[in-house]
Amino acid sequence: MYIRSQLMEIANSKGYDIKNNDISWLIHMNIIHPGKLTKAIFSYDDEDLEWVEKLGELKLRGLEKSVIEKIFTTGTSELVFEFLERARYYSSDMEECE
């Protein structure tokens, strides 16, 4: 079990630039689900930490939260997945030719 500051501390110690608003965004997007310890303190588990680190990895690679949110909120996730699958298919096909 972790509290928010511990999540950020662990992720930041691994080189991820995680801020308080990143945790809030993950909650808002329904990606992590903290438990309530007190009125103002919430608990997070190992799975929540994994998602915080995944967000950190995306941020390191230059993918902003706004892009991810736009894909979710515009209902285009299936279309984006189709593009990714097609690109992955032809990418691996080209690797076999080399």
Image (cartoon, rainbow, N blue to C red):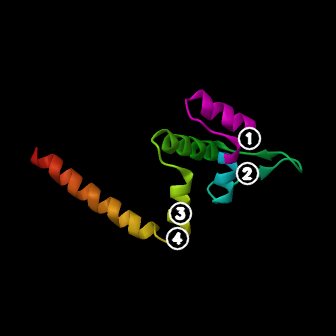
Please name the residue shown 53% across and 65% down the image: 72
Q: Residue furthest left?
A: 97
Mark toward the start of the polypeptide (3 vs 2): 2
Between 48 and 84, the one lying in front of the other is 84
Residue tagged 4: 74
In this rendering, is residue 15 above or below 41? above
Q: Which mark is residue 75?
A: none
Within 10 Å of disc 2 (Cα), the crowding (few <14, some 14-19, many 20+) is some
Disc 4 secondary structure class: loop
Query: Mark 1 and 3 residues: CB-CB less than 8 Å, in contact?
Result: no
Callout 2 amino acid: Pro
Q: Nearer the viewer, residue 21 or 82?
A: 21
Packing grade of label 1 (10 A; few <14, some 14-19, many >=20) is some
10 lies left or right of 54: right
- Give residue 93's position: percent from left, percent from top: 17, 54
Q: Amino acid at mark 3?
A: Lys
Tell me the quarter of the image containing the N terminus: top right
> Which stretch is magenta?
1-21
**In terms of image quadrants, where is residue 53?**
top right
The spot of residue 77 in percent (x, y) is 46, 66
Q: Would residue 87 be counted in the magenta stretch?
A: no
Residue that mark 1 sits on: 4
The mark that comes first in sequence, 1 or 3, is 1
> Do callouts 2 and 1 mark residues in contact (Cβ within 8 Å)?
yes
Residue position marked by numbered label 2 in the rendering = 34
User: For the residues marked 2 and 4, what is the alpha-carbon distance in whole angstroms?
Assistant: 26 Å
**In the displayed structure, does residue 18 sit left or right of residue 76?**
right
The image quarter containing residue 5 is top right
